[in-house]
Amino acid sequence: MGTWGTGISSNDVFADIHHEFVELYNDGGDPVEISSKIIKENWEMIEIPEDNHNFWFALALAQWECKQLAPDVFETVRSIIETGKDIDLWRELGSSEKDIRKREGVLRNFLEKLSTEKSRARARKKQRICDPPFEKGSCITFKLANGNYGGAVVLEAIPLKGYAYNLVAVTRIDSVAPPEIKDFTKADILTLTYGKWENTPAIHWMALRHFVDDGDLFEKVGEIEVLQQFDTSSSEYGFCGGWKIWIIDSIGSQFEHEKDFGAPKKHPKISDFISERWWKFW
């Protein structure tokens, strides 16, 4: 779920959905059409209990800010809050009673806010093209929870209006010394099997703000050539939030899981995405 506080906006799902709505709105999109697009493209997220509530909270707030809060969206949010479903979920996830009390107050205030029509619609802002934090092919290293060095490779870099994305492939590098370029070219991509993951390659789209937020956790080692092309509109790879939660903590959780259940027998390799191996497919 990527939650860092009790606030309505203090989680990755809310931040990403709200940002996507505002981005399309600033580009001149109609709020009704934007809402339909976001719901259609994020149906998988809506079906995940840990993400469902935050998705509808984000969409409701974005619509309210544009004076276009749909009755069915408001009723969905009202039901989540008044039936106690969100609080029940927080308890299931092991939240403290202190945090639950804070969350209850936040939810009451949020519902009250949505129940009062906004005086003026959100102004549209012209957006500039943003450059992603790393070039395609960048090899990145960072410290793991065990004190060793991990590694990841940027498979794609996409500049967009108001946003920018990198597609990041997390590797199984786990070394005492900082990895070198040759270590990245021969590395396996981490396959996730812990929790609800089912042999899923750890390849995620990450937004510019997630690098900015966790910018002190990683550094660039160098670059390798990546010839394949990737697009954010593809459903093959999902979007994720902060670097620590989705990469460093995820690696730690997978390695801990493997102590009891063993590592997956097969892993995709970084070499599958770079020039030497790519040309062999033809």
Image (tube, rainbow, N blue to C red):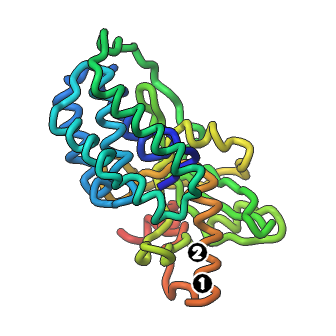
- Amino acid type, residue under disc 2 in the picture: Gln
- Amino acid type, residue under disc 1 in the picture: Glu
Q: Quadrant of residue 228?
A: bottom left
Q: Are marks 2 and 1 in contact (CB under 8 Å)?
A: yes
Residue 75 location in percent, x, y? Answer: 20, 40
CA gap between label 2 and label 1 equals 6 Å
Residue 207's place in the image compared with 179, above or below, is above
Q: Nearer the viewer, residue 202 or 120?
A: 120
- Which part of the image, by quadrant, shows the C terminus? bottom left
Q: Secondary structure at mark 2?
A: helix
Q: Secondary structure at mark 1?
A: helix
Badge 1 is on which residue? 258
> Is any part of residue 33 visible from this angle?
yes
Residue at (30, 45) in percent of width and height: 82
Q: Is residue 90 left or right of residue 112?
A: right
Residue 281 location in percent, x, y? Answer: 38, 71
Disc 1 residue crowd, few under 14, some 14–19, many 20+, Cα 10 Å: some
Residue 70 location in percent, x, y? Answer: 18, 31
Residue at (42, 51) in percent of width and height: 239
Q: Is residue 255 left or right of residue 148?
A: left
Residue at (59, 50) in percent of width and height: 98
Residue 10's place in the image compared with 143, above or below, is above
Badge 2 is on which residue? 254
Q: Quadrant of residue 122?
A: top left
